[in-house]
Image (cartoon, rainbow, N blue to C red):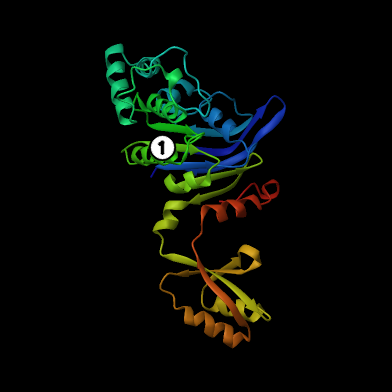
Amino acid sequence: MAPVIQLQDLVVHLGSAPILKGLSCELAGPTIGLLGPNGAGKSTLIRSLLGFHDAAGGTARVLGLDPQGEARDIRSQVGYMPEHDSFISGQTAIRFVRYMAELHGLPTPEAMERAHEALFWVGLGEARYREVDGFSTGMKQRVKLAQAIVHSPSLVILDEPTNGLDPPGRARMLELVKELAATDGLTLLVSSHVMGDIETCADEVLILKEGRVARVHQLRAEREGDHRFLEIELVGDEAPFLHALNDLGLAHSRGTRQRLRVATQRDFPVAKIFQAALDAGVTVRSLVQREDTLREVFLDAMEVDVSANGGAA
């Protein structure tokens, strides 16, 4: 799959302050998650991809286009659901969504037809003639989603789509996001501080830290992959055991609480690991199979010294 977003040593300053510090990665989707703590550069990256911030160095390409010189072409193919409400006071949902479609260049009759379709799809068909000012938070979020897709974009950017929602509203929004993700020819970029949201809907995740790439993680490949992780706690000198793991062709690293983390195929016989421990003269105190959750990936990424190595893919 061709990359939808390509970054090569992208540097962006706000005033004299460097915000994005040499981002390099390729993201293909179909659903891309964007994670990072406050101040990591997520919002600046989104605005840069849309051409609102000039690059001080490096390059970016969105849908094959350069935000520096082709920002209008990019925006014509992008739908954007903002984190914060940006409604026009006194407008009904149908009028607001129709107006947003017209801003994207659709003639009024087609814009009205698309607005009806989008509002019915997000579950607001019965409420479309009501003023948005009186809507609940969940309804307002769905209006924002409707206006982001009304013009049939190629890329939809969702900035904190479950912001302020209660559990039922959050579940409904995530269902809509997953339905959108199944649309042929459409890519989603979902920015959220809620790891559960990203883990639910994303195929790959870009994790930012201090304006740099901390990690790009392939969630779909991991879910579909034929591998597992074993977390092992040992008693004794583990050096001979590590040599034995190498002889078995098993990759290993440090996991949570400094326990040994071993990657194996799902059908690899665990008995061979116990035998290797016996031969090495160490005792296996515990052995637990772990799935590599996004939380663990994120916490590992936050420990990366991005200032030294520019991040890890």
**Is any part of residue 237 visible from this angle?**
yes
> Is residue 51 found left or right of 112 in the rendered image?
right
For residue 122, which quarter of the picture?
top left
User: Who's the residue at 49% across and 62% down the image?
Assistant: 291
Q: Position of residue 99 (x, y in %)?
A: 38, 14
Q: In which quadrant of the rendered view does residue 35 lie?
A: top right
Q: Nearer the viewer, residue 95 or 48?
A: 95
x, y (%) of residue 186? 36, 36
Tally the numbered discs: 1
Q: Residue at x 72, y 26 (%)?
A: 16
Looking at the image, residue 254 lies above or below residue 141: below
The kind of residue on which mark 1 rests is: Met
Mark 1 residue crowding within 10 angstroms, few (<14) / some (14–19) / many (20+): many
Is 313 left, or right, of 117 in this rendering?
right
**Is residue 28 at all visible to an observer of this figure?**
no
Quadrant containing the N terminus in the rendered view = top left
Q: Residue at x 58, y 73 (%)?
A: 232
- Picture layout, residue 281 above or below residue 285: below
Instruction: Kindly identify which residue carries mark 1.
Output: 173
Q: Nearer the viewer, residue 87 or 307?
A: 87
- In this view of the protein, which residue sits in the foreground, 74 or 131? 131
Report the front residue among 305 and 146.
146
